[in-house]
Amino acid sequence: MTPSARWSFSGRVLFSSAFVLTSALIALAIALQQGIPVVLACAVTLLTSLLALFMLLGRQIRRRQQILATLEDGIKSIKDGDLSLRISPSSDPDLARLITLYNQLSTNLKQQKQKLNQKELVLDSIVQASPMATLLLDKHRHIVYHNAAARQLLNKQPGALTGSSLDTACDTLPEALAQALNNGYGGMLSFEQQEQKHTFYLGAESVTLNYQPHTLVICKNVSAEQNREEIMLWKNAIRLISHELNNSLAPIQSLTGSAQTMLNQQKHLDLLPDMLDTISQRAQNLSEFIQRYAEYARLPAPCCAVHPVAPVLERLQVLYPFTLLGSAPTGNGYFDVAQIEQVLLNLLKNAHESGSDKADIAVQVVQEQTRLRFAVVDRGSGIQSGNLHQALQPFYSTKSHGTGLGLSLCHDIITAHQGQLRLRNREKGGLMVEFDLPLKENTK
């Protein structure tokens, strides 16, 4: 290996200088031996030495400049996003380390870019396959990205959306939906068009892309899902009503037939009053059952006023005994006394029918800053953890003869009072039902 292949640039300069100086001294000595005048010999030797030194140093500098220029081109390529340029190893130890670092950087960036591209492709495939319409808007409300569901929703060709404004893209949508999208509305939106009800879920979120503010807009037509859910609820209601009607009409029909036979045969007529009382009782029970469904369908708005809490609990104590936890409430609440009594009555009735000992059924009322919080607890069978979210839905019941309206009606009443009703299974068995009410009228 030659010195130039293992020395640094400074070493090459010193080696070239030493080589030229040694050659000049040898040439000068030879010239003096040949009888050439000293001044002439020194002048010729100096000029020749300087020329040779400049040629050697110029060659080394040109090689170094070429490598530096190549490095500059490589860095410019990285800046422009081109990561394919690689530089051959240099014999200069100083530049060799720099070139190695450049090649490693270029390779790492290329691998990272490939991984990022693969992730973007996967993400784009997921978004494109999503049934939810997705739009990405720039700060001028122009569409910079969309998926297939968005094209289908807006009824546009693939190339007609990118770059267009959201207002222009929504020109074929119903007015209510177009206005909601342009205003950045988030949540469920329902409207009627051509005597049909449509429901959409909308969402808008601010995001940052390439250091620029953007808006992500999503939209999904959930009309079919909502219709299916409503149909299932009505099917359950019809099934429950049919079950109760059959349970009542079958014995009524049987007793009526027996009474007709007695009249025809003029036998056992003394049994007719009892049979008629039974028929009347069954008809009354059926009427009450149908009335409960009718009341649920037309739940009136609460007539709220300031009422003391203690008398409400005292009246309920007579119907369904319970233990009052803590001190008796002395304050007032702002509620519809009839509806809140109905809520507590349903909850206490459920507690007594849950299999809990009566001594374990309790009510607690806690007064906070602006709310009254009620809790009804028992040690019954509770509700399966997977069914807690269904217990507040209409027509859902864990009882074999339940109508599935009690908790749902309580939930609607508390919601109408600007409160919230929650269910929670207790650690050692039983159920806790909590709800809150305002202490006074909300004047906001």
Image (spheres, grey):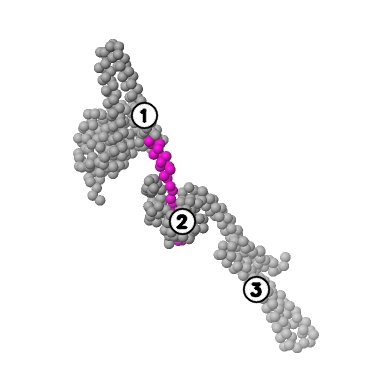
Instruction: For label 2, count other residues whose C-alpha is less than 10 Å away and answer few (under 14), some (14-19) or many (20+).
Output: many
Magenta segment range?
A: 211-234
Q: Secondary structure at mark 2?
A: strand
Q: Name the residue: 26% across, 13% down.
A: 269
| Residue 370 lies in quadrant | top left
Look at label 3 and name its amino acid. Ile
Residue at label 3?
A: 61
Image x and y of residue 67, in percent:
64, 69
Residue at label 1?
A: 242
The tag earlier along the polypeptide, 2 or 1, is: 2
What separation in Å lies between label 3 and label 1 (alpha carbons)? 100 Å
Out of 427 and 282, give the one closest to the viewer: 282
Q: Is residue 215 magenta?
A: yes
Image x and y of residue 230, in percent:
39, 39
Q: Name the residue: 62% across, 63% down.
A: 85
Q: Name the residue: 30% across, 13% down.
A: 264
The tag earlier along the polypeptide, 3 or 1, is: 3
Image x and y of residue 207, in percent:
44, 56
Mark 3 or 2: in front is: 2
Contact, mark 3 vs mark 2 (Cβ under 8 Å): no
Residue at label 2?
A: 136
| Residue 362 lies in quadrant | top left
- Left of 26 or right of it: where is 12? left
Q: Secondary structure at mark 1?
A: helix
Furthest residue in direction front, as rendered: 264
Out of 157 and 56, give the one closest to the viewer: 157
Q: Secondary structure at mark 3?
A: helix
Q: Name the residue: 77% across, 84% down.
A: 31
Contact, mark 2 vs mark 1 (Cβ under 8 Å): no
Mark 2 or 1: in front is: 1
